[in-house]
Amino acid sequence: MLLWFVATAVLTVHTVFRDPRFDHRWLIVGVLLPDVVDVWFGGARVLHSVTGAVIVLTVVMLATIGRRPLRKRLLGIPIGVMLHLVFDGAFDDPNVFWWPFTGGFDDAALPVVSRGWWNLALEVAGAGLIAWSWRRFGLADPQRRQLFRTTGQLHPVATVD
């Protein structure tokens, strides 16, 4: 799944933080990271746990000591990982979600695999949210698309009420 995670993460961060300088590109990396990494380990593993999200946050914080502008950009990664847990429903498997405090991984499948055909409905919803966002952020304008490509910034189009 791609569209569901990207759309929900971008819209959530934009709505909650309202930071016009937030780099959404790193958020997109973070929201896709758990599935991209854990699939290689055969199922839901460390990045589908709260502990994994905290580890990612800790790594970013330690790697950016004294480099505040870089930290501000890279914080999108752990925020994205945490949002992945929410929008993936990772909390459905408490043994994985609360690892290592409540159990282990056993043979836990990725939530995206467990959901089966429901993924299609979520991807359609994600496509709809992306289409709405495309208009909301004026991404039909090449200059706005270039701004997003180079800075990760999204600015809503002014509306007349």
Image (spheres, grey):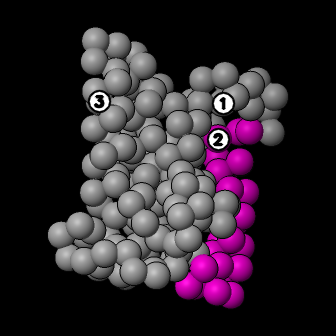
Q: Please report the residue visible at 71 percent of the width from the left and 73 percent of the height from the top.
A: 124
Q: Position of residue 28 (x, y in %)?
A: 57, 45
Q: Indicate left or right for 60 with 119 as reference.
A: left
Q: Quadrant of the N terminus?
A: bottom right
- Local crowd at mark 3 within 10 Å, few (<14), some, or many (≥20)? some
Place residue 42 in its image quadrant: bottom right
Foreground pick, 157 / 72: 72
Cα–Cα gap, marks 1 and 3: 24 Å
Residue bearing mark 2: 137
- Tag 1 near tag 3, CB within 8 Å: no
- Tag 2 near tag 1, CB within 8 Å: yes
Which residue is farthest left? 101
Majority secondary structure of the magenta segment?
helix
Q: Secondary structure at mark 1?
A: helix
Residue bearing mark 1: 148
Residue 12 on the magenta span: no
Q: Please report the residue visible at 25 percent of the width from the left and 77 percent of the height from the top.
A: 103
The residue segment tinted magenta is 113-139
Can residue 155 be seen here? no
Q: Secondary structure at mark 3?
A: helix
Q: Earlier in the sequence, mark 1 or mark 3?
A: 3
Q: Amino acid at mark 3?
A: Met
- Local crowd at mark 2 within 10 Å, few (<14), some, or many (≥20)? some
Q: Please report the residue visible at 18 percent of the width from the left and 69 percent of the height from the top.
A: 101
Residue bearing mark 3: 61
Q: Mark 3, mark 2: which one is toward the viewer?
A: 3
